[in-house]
Image (spheres, grey):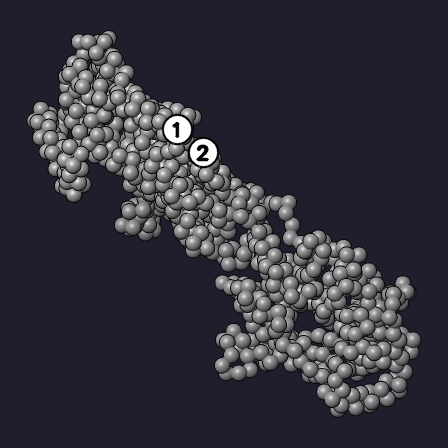
Amino acid sequence: MKKNISQLTQWLKEHSLLLKLIFLGSVLVFVANQVTHIAQGMTWADIFSTMEQQSTGRLIGMVLAGLLGVIPMLLYDYVVVKLLEKEGKPPMKRMDWLTSAWVTNTINNLAGFGGVVGATLRINFYGKDVPRGKVVATVSKVALFLISGLSILSFVAFVDLFFIRTQNVFREYWVWLLLGSLIAPALWFFTYLKRRTLFKTFFPKAVLLLFGASLGQWLGGMFAFLMIGRLMQVPVSMVSVYPMFVIATLIGMLTMVPGGMGTFDVLMILGLSQLGIDRSQAVVWLLYYRLFYYVTPFMTGVILFLQQAGMKVNQFFDNLPRLFSQKVAHFILVAALYFAGIMMVLLSTVTNLSNVSRLFQVLLPFSFNFLDQTLNLFVGFLLLGLARGISMKVKKAYWPTIILLGFCIVNTVARTTSWQLIAVYAVILLAVILARKEFYREKFVYSWGALTVDSILFGCLFIGYAVAGYYAARPAGGNQVINHFLLFPSDDVWFNGLIGLSISLIGLFFLYQYLAETTVTLGEGFEEARLTRFLEKFGGNEGSQFLYLKDYGHFYYQEEGEDQVLFGFQMKFNKCFVLADPIGHREKWTAATLAFMDQADLLGYQLVFYRISEEYVMNLHDCGFEFMKVGEEGLIQFDEPSTVNQTAWTETVTEKIAAEAADFQFEFYPETISDALYQELERVSADWSRNQKERYFIGGRLDPEYLKCSSVGLVRQKQTVIGFITGKEMEKGKSISYDLLRIRSEAPAFTREYLFTHFIETYQQQGYQLIDIGMAPLANVGESKYSFLKERFVNIFYKYSYQIYAFQDTRKRKEQYVTSWQPRYFAYPKRTSVLFAFVQLSLLITKGRHQSVSLVEEAMTEI
């Protein structure tokens, strides 16, 4: 006997695949036969007629019923997670396991195959930090309980049909119900026997939870099915239907067909027909059940699965896929806003816009359009304003954009039901969601490039509206074609539109003001004690003396609460101009620059560096900056006597003799000067300023507070001060940089050389090693025929711009003193117009930050 059983078992194993195919084939033959029989008793017209009777509210109710029916399945995954935590798995975040649970159960609900798909997904989702063998064992044991809840329902239905409603039409299926009801007790008995071995971690709490989860799963499916029937208003008692639902589900599960498809449906249609329900209505009922309980949750699960998979791919590729999708979504959103705004304004201007070209015939159905002309103009210009804010990634523009887009979409869809239009709007809303992390800037600042584009756009729209008004006032004459397209019904309509245009501009102005307001500031203001302490610790450079001017901002880079690197800057339009290299730890320059860039970018500003060294410009290049040479810094180094221009020093002897003959007297004040002497210097400065322009960003100021930290050298002629020069220490006792050099207009020509010579000799005698005498702008820039084109243009400007500025004379005057020249560079962000940056720098130098500007310059000022 045992031998026969063993042989039978072996034969079944060898032919298991064939037997499975025969079994599934027989099921499919049965299903196909029954479907053919069912189809003979109905028509497609009946099915479509039944579907058309369902209102939108009922369909929404069916969707909710299907989603609610899936929720009890999540208890399976709760049990799995808790069991694995006993095996050493770290606790999962609630949102993580809820997402994984929803994905697993919604996909398994449709995919079926006896829970194989669900088990595979659970192993992948919960298998981290736990040996794979333990995970597989736990998930496999949980899969045994999937049918236990259906077994309990089979027992309930069996008792109902066999003892209570004995005349029920479904009593003939009592054998299936009896066999199904035996599964749960058998499973409980088996787990009880193995409670100390195989199910040691399960018994009894986890086993009870799994029985409850399975019961909840099948009750949820029954709830969804019966609720869909109730919403369809099928004329039958739901109590009469549930036994057939249990029977069909049980048989469908035993076939292991995905979701019981085919067997369940055929049995339900036959059973519902026995209850007197029309077959077309039964088909629609089952169709909705499949759609809203299986397909709709499955789609949500797939979306969440793709999201999770996308997150893993995104992590693997170091966040690049997410950044790419954000950029694409941001581009789509900006393009959609500009398109919508322009089309709305055009619709208010050109009455027959669709007749202008076929392009507008295609585009018009996808644009927003209100019945009121004023509202069209107002919303159109707001969309254009928000488009600029969105393109600049201003955080405060995000929610106003969502609200305005929502208002426009609801208004348009309510009046025009078009699936193409809804699909386009869905893409726009998806772009809004995907691009949400692109918006980080605290304020809106106009760049010259953006202002130029918007000025052209608004200008064209205003001109178009003015042209329309012109032809509206003269409909009889002129070009009849233009009249046909631009003619308003009356002057009053055009004038009402003009009022709307004015209101739109006012709204646009307040929108820009709202976007530009913020309490966040870039860097910090002037703190003399902090600045002095920092310079004493780290020393300065050729630009550090200007940091005592109160129109400079200071950005301190800190580590562990200690100032490490300092940048001095001034703002002009959307540029933050930084003079000279950073001050502080050289090894922390890159980190400090990146921190400064982040803070400036947060407020919508771009960093531009002027007069920086070759060493630092390479750091900036690594940070994404482009650069060009803008001149050379002149240095006098006393520790390298072999490099001194001896000829220049010899020539100064003649000047000394001439100075003595002219009764010149040099005086040097290393510390604070008296008020009386300051007044004399003021008179010299006032005389000098009649013929010279004050330079604001790269030059000092004659200010008593500013001169406190300066040394002053002056020349008297017959007791009258006719010129002075100031200097500031860069590194105490080692290096000095000259600042102001101002001379009366009637002073002898060699007064400048006299001051320079004595200034240099004084510091040489005091033991200083280096004197910085400033930059020779544009010197040795673009001299090679292989230089960049922009540097070649600079070279031409350097050679032939005598009437604007004597660049070559500046180089010659300093050359007689300089022992070495060091190149200096201008660095600006990539994709930035170097022309605009240079013009803005020139305005900063000549006009300063707060000086009055011309009307054109005022128009280019940021909001």
Secondary element at image label 2: helix
Q: Is residue 792 left or right of residue 703?
A: left
- Give the quarter of the figure containing the N terminus: top left
Q: Residue at x 70, y 78 (%)?
A: 634
Residue 460 rendering spot, x and y as whole percentages: 43, 53
Q: Is residue 560 left or right of residue 432?
A: right
Residue 92 rendering spot, x and y as whole percentages: 47, 38
Quadrant of residue 745 within the rendered picture: bottom right
The type of residue carrying mark 1 is Arg
Q: Residue at x 28, y 20 (%)?
A: 153
Dot 1: within a 10 Å radius of its alpha carbon, few (fewer than 14), some, or many (20 or more) residues? some
Question: In this figure, which residue is indicated by the disc labeled 2?
Answer: 82
Dot 2: within a 10 Å radius of its alpha carbon, few (fewer than 14), some, or many (20 or more) residues? some
Q: Residue at x 62, y 72 (%)?
A: 615
The type of residue carrying mark 2 is Lys
| Res 858 visible | no
Q: Counting residues from the N terminus, which is met first, the one under dot 1 or under dot 2?
A: 2
